[in-house]
């Protein structure tokens, strides 16, 4: 048995040919059956897949399937599609080959009703009527990892699937058995799950979200893929990795141009191909590492970025406290330490230096001048709260005009010349959160320590910053103390 088209590997598709009368009839029957449960389920394999580009030729319903080494979305175990799938399995069995099957789990649209008798959101019936795989749809933002110890073609598939769109859904996978009832009424029969589920990608709890199911006899290998996976990436993997590893004779039979017979290669060809595959594997691993590093850096920065630029109240205080801590300063939340709002928001200091009170304020419009008076009163009442810990100066950090984009805000918190001049005689430093943010994103810890504790902070011994130093961004004017700049 061989492909009718030289060079193309035949693949069984458990659907009618696109645009055929059979397809229209199937869609109509589904729409009638599901008219009370929402829109009809779409066909899994789209009609615009570039089969020939990947060295494949599709075999739809009604076409010979016994010479196919792989099947896509069989999905029908009775009625139409059943005979073709059985011939597919029979042909692989006769040749002594593993039958490769690809099945899709779940629905990306997420709005299909769940069977009230089912405890899972999605399931796929496997090699026989007694075993299925499926589970619950996982929360948004879940990022899977490659299963430990994965090698060869399956590891390559894992790397490819990690490039799915960030918002693409995932479903947990677990094997389930089934139950049946004797026709004579003698009771229920439990059918345990058969075969083995081999993880390819796992979630943060170690549960598989992509896996290969091996039948008990080892003659079927089903790949369970989440919906919203691009078929093109799967087909490329099938021809270049899966078939050479699991069914190499299929490429030889079809005289596929992608078939590489290691027995006919020169030493130079083998060496170059091995080096190329090693390079591709290292590139994919490094790319994944950098993407994970970027994602983690973004997640770590997002709360601070949003808090400093658009926050008010508690989230603004927490963001500022984190920035000061990362700059190597000792930071104490006075609301937690003293209870209630008896003093300023934070007490900040460094080794060998006097501490300062930090008052944090948010203003949707221009900052009111009376906010400076709030901090002055806290400085006056501090000796009553902590007489053994003298504090003589304070810092007012204001997120002013926080409803505007940072680029649209005024550079200085206060602009009235008479008020700005009066600040020079007060023990109060005024800092904009935009200015603090720009120092923080550039990892300019010296600028932060100097702005909060004064020029002496640059030479004082302080804790090591949490974040490692990074190349500074281009600096612009720094404003504090009501408009003085450096």
Image: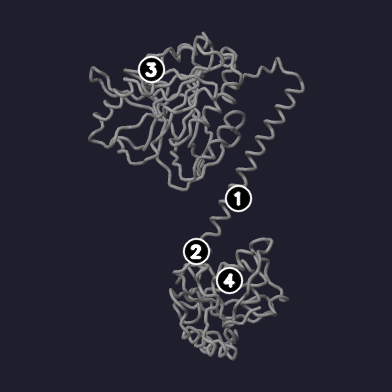
Residue 77, image quadrant: top left
Give the tally of numbered discs.
4
Q: Is residue 217 visible?
A: no
Q: Between tags 2 and 1, which lies in front?
A: 2
Label whose residue precedes the other's in the sequence (1 or 3): 3
User: What residue is disc 1 on?
Assistant: 293
**Mark 4 lies on residue:** 436
Lower position in the chain sequence, tag 2 or tag 1:
1
Q: Is residue 252 left or right of residue 195?
A: right
Residue 12 versus residue 365 in the image, above or below: above
Q: Residue 61, labelled with which disc?
A: 3
Residue 470: image location, x then y, percent:
68, 61
Residue 424, x across and y down, in percent? 60, 89
- The numbered mark, 3 or 4, whose residue comes first in the sequence reads 3
Q: How is the image coloured?
A: one colour
Q: Nearer the viewer, mark 1 or mark 3?
A: 3
Q: Identify the image quadrant of residue 326.
A: bottom right
Residue at point 69%, 35% (across, down) = 279
Residue under label 2 = 306
Q: Residues within 10 Å of mark 3 (few under 14, many from 20)?
A: many
């Amino acid at each position: 048995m061989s492909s009718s088209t030289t060079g193309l590997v035949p693949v069984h598709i458990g659907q009618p040919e696109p645009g055929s009368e059979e397809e229209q009839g199937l869609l109509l029957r589904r729409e009638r059956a599901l008219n009370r449960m929402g829109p009809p389920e779409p066909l899994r394999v789209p009609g615009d897949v570039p089969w020939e580009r990947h060295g494949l030729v599709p075999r739809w319903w009604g076409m010979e399937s016994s010479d196919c080494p792989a099947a896509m979305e069989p999905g029908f175990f009775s009625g139409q599609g059943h005979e073709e799938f059985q011939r597919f399995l029979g042909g692989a069995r006769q040749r002594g080959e593993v039958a490769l099957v690809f099945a899709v789990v779940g629905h990306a649209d997420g709005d299909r009703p769940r069977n009230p008798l089912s405890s899972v959101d999605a399931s796929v019936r496997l090699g026989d009527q007694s075993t299925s795989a499926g589970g619950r749809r996982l929360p948004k933002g879940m990022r899977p990892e490659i299963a430990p110890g994965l090698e060869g073609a399956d590891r390559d598939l894992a790397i490819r699937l990690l490039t799915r769109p960030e918002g693409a859904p995932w479903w947990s996978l677990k094997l389930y058995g089934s139950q049946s009832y004797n026709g004579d009424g003698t009771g229920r029969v439990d059918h345990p799950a058969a075969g083995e589920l081999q993880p390819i990608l796992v979630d943060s709890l170690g549960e598989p979200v992509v896996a290969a199911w091996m039948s008990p006899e080892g003659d079927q290998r089903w790949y369970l893929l989440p919906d919203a996976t691009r078929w093109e990436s799967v087909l490329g993997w099938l021809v270049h990795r899966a078939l050479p590893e699991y069914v190499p004779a299929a490429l030889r039979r079809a005289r596929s141009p992608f078939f590489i017979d290691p027995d006919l290669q020169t030493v130079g060809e083998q060496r170059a191909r091995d080096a190329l595959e090693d390079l591709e594997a290292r590139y994919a691993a490094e790319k994944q590492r950098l993407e994970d590093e970027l994602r983690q850096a973004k997640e770590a920065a997002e709360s601070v970025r949003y808090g400093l630029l658009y926050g008010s109240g508690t989230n603004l205080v927490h963001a500022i406290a984190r920035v000061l801590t990362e700059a190597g300063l000792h930071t104490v939340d006075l609301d937690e330490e003293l209870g209630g709002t008896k003093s300023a928001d934070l007490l900040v200091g460094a080794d060998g230096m006097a501490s300062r009170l930090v008052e944090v304020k948010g203003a949707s419009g221009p900052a009111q001048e009376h906010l400076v008076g709030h901090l002055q009163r806290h400085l006056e009442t501090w000796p009553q709260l902590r007489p053994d810990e003298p504090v003589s100066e304070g810092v007012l950090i204001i997120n002013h005009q926080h409803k505007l984009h940072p680029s649209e805000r005024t550079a200085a918190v206060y602009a009235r010349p008479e008020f700005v001049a009066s600040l020079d005689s007060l023990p109060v430093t005024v800092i904009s959160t935009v200015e603090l943010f720009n120092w923080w994103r550039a990892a300019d810890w010296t600028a932060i320590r100097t702005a909060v504790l004064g020029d002496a902070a640059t030479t004082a011994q302080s804790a090591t910053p949490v974040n490692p130093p990074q190349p500074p961004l281009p600096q612009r004017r720094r404003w504090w103390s009501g408009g003085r700049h450096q």
